[in-house]
Image: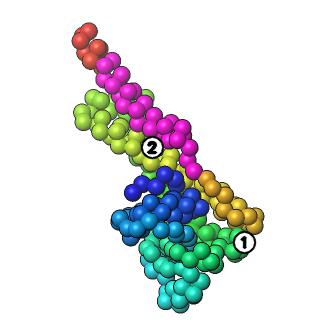
Amino acid sequence: DQPPCSEYDIPAMEAWLSQQAARGRELTDWCRFRDAEPRACQFALEPAEKDQYKPPEEQREAYGDAGWEFVCSSSLFLVWRSVRPDAMPLRTDPTADSWAYGRLWERVRNSTLWAILALLGVLIFWIRQGGNCFFLSTIRAGGTWKFLLFLAVEAVTAAHLLLDLRCFRQLLDSLRCGFPMPRRRIRPRRRALLFCIPLAMILLNLVSMANLLKDSGSV
């Protein structure tokens, strides 16, 4: 399932998972559910080390005594669940938590920057190939309209990555200042603006094609 918030909005993700459990959807894997009896649960997301998909047994036992059980993991988080109302919270010291989330921030930031650099490299290559008539050159080359669509998808992906990165940074800054994580989410209006990017690219391509056909008919 697609969560209604950024994956990096940890408090919102935990609340969303609790809502799904209350609706009778039991978490089996990251954002995957199965039908079950509705129950009141609370969830906690903890940063996972690189290539870590399960917690060590010592951590399982310590968290089990505190009322938590390990459920699943993603490439970034370990997911814990508790059905006990008296379970001890896992995040009690924002300053101490900031160290673990700071290490995760470095991984997320580096992967995002590499993805954006790759996108810029592809864009610069095609602009140099097309010169000042970039869009016209891509149309004449035949079949490269698919590249424009690919580029639009990459642009939307990069925009989402940057917005998610900004959300994560705000959470981390809050922890470093000694405050609990505030809730952040991408607003629906902002999502609508992001979807306008590929639409504008497609419309621009269609206009360019129409101008090309018009010029060919006048010759």
Nearer to the camera, 147 or 215: 147
Which residue is depicted at the point 54% across and 64% down? 14
Query: Comparing marks 1 and 2, which lies closer to the viewer?
Result: 1
- The magenta-colored residue range is 185-211
Residue 189 forms part of the magenta stretch = yes
Q: Is residue 91 above or below residue 155?
A: below
Kindly tell me whether residue 44 is visible in this rendering: yes
Residue 146 on image: x %, y %: 29, 39
Which residue is depicted at the point 52% across and 55% down? 6
Horizontally, is 190 left or right of 75 in the view?
A: right
Residue 197 forms part of the magenta stretch = yes
Query: Circle 1 — which element?
Result: helix
Name the main secondary structure of what is drawn in magenta: helix
Which residue of the protein is positioned furthest toward the top in this rendering?
218
Q: Residues within 10 Å of mark 2 (few under 14, many from 20)?
A: some
Q: Quadrant of residue 74?
A: bottom left
Q: Which residue is mark 2?
A: 155
Residue 215 on image: x %, y %: 29, 14
Q: Quadrant of residue 207?
A: top left
N-terminal label among 1 and 2: 1
Nearer to the camera, 160 or 128: 160
Query: Circle 2 — which element?
Result: helix
Which residue is depicted at the point 42% across and 54% down? 2
Residue 69 on image: x %, y %: 50, 80
Q: Residues within 10 Å of mark 1 (few under 14, many from 20)?
A: some
Task: Please give the label number shown on residue 95.
Answer: 1
Residue 150 on image: x %, y %: 35, 43
Which residue is depicted at the point 61% across and 78% down? 87
| Residue type at the position of mark 2 | Ala
